[in-house]
Image (cartoon, rainbow, N blue to C red):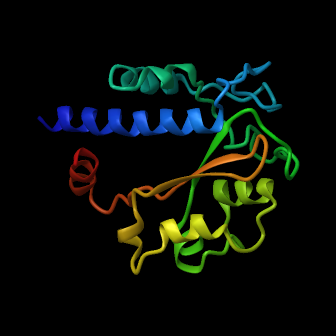
């Protein structure tokens, strides 16, 4: 029963994601000359279990997700230690931002963000406040209240981002329960 609930929840998330993709790309998803690479180096070591892990999700994933290719490098396509795309350089993709509540919800300011989120904000040229509609969407008194929220925002042509605050895994059983709601 829990697996069925998880499957239903994932299907809803994927349907919502599909709707956001249609907003970002009303003419359809553009063909990429080198899908999933975005100018990344090609000598990245393979993760033999990655393909196996991905195959486990295919039976419960939305068909749209089968068009995606998961790669073992950064959110903007650069290998570790290599520069990503230049600031404001359009990409034929929708980028998912693993947003931190302290930045996007509590202060509404991108300054100081690191990791994948910091790389995304640098690419967007976002050095200060988030757009008001983005910050307002994540505004909450506590981080727990903002978890599992997501907001699509277009920062310009080829600069589409889904900001998302994922649930914190504080306890594995509670996390499974949360995802199955």
Where residue 52 appears, x then y in whole percent? 44, 21
Residue 114 as seen in the image, left or right of residue 78: left
Where residue 76 appears, x then y in whole percent? 72, 42
- Residue at the spot 22% in from the left edge and 57% down from the top edge: 174
Where residue 92 appears, x then y in whole percent? 74, 32
Instruction: Report the quarter where the N terminus lies.
Output: top left
Residue 165 as seen in the image, left or right of residue 133: left
- Residue at the spot 65% in from the left edge and 57% down from the top edge: 117
The relative height of residue 79 versus residue 101 in the rendered view (above or below) is above
The relative height of residue 63 versus residue 96 in the rendered view (above or below) is above
Q: Quadrant of residue 80?
A: top right
The foreground one among 37 and 106 is 106
Where residue 6 appears, x then y in whole percent? 25, 38
The relative height of residue 65 versus residue 95 in the rendered view (above or below) is above
- Residue at the spot 81% in from the left edge and 60% down from the top edge: 125
Residue 99 as seen in the image, left or right of residue 174: right
The foreground one among 69 and 129 is 129
Residue 38 as seen in the image, left or right of residue 137: right
Numbered disc total: 0
Q: Quadrant of residue 146?
A: bottom left
Q: Residue furthest left?
A: 1
The relative height of residue 92 versus residue 56 in the rendered view (above or below) is below
Q: Quadrant of residue 109?
A: bottom right
């Amino acid at each position: 029963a829990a697996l069925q609930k998880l499957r239903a929840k994932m299907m809803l998330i994927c349907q919502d994601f599909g709707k956001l993709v249609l907003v970002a790309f009303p003419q359809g998803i553009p063909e990429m000359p080198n899908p999933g690479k975005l100018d990344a180096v090609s000598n990245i070591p393979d993760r033999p279990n990655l393909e196996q892990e991905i195959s486990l999700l295919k039976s419960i994933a939305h068909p749209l997700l089968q068009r995606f290719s998961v790669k073992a490098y950064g959110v903007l396509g650069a290998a570790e230690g290599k520069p990503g795309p230049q600031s404001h350089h359009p990409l034929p993709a929708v980028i998912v931002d693993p947003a931190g509540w302290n930045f996007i919800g509590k202060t509404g300011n991108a300054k100081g963000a690191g990791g994948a989120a910091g790389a995304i904000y640098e690419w967007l040229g976002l050095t200060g406040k988030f757009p008001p509609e983005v910050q307002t969407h994540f505004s909450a008194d506590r981080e727990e209240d903002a978890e599992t929220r997501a907001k699509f925002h277009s920062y310009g042509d080829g600069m589409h981002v889904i900001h998302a605050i994922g649930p914190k895994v504080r306890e594995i059983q509670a996390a499974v329960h949360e995802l199955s709601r």
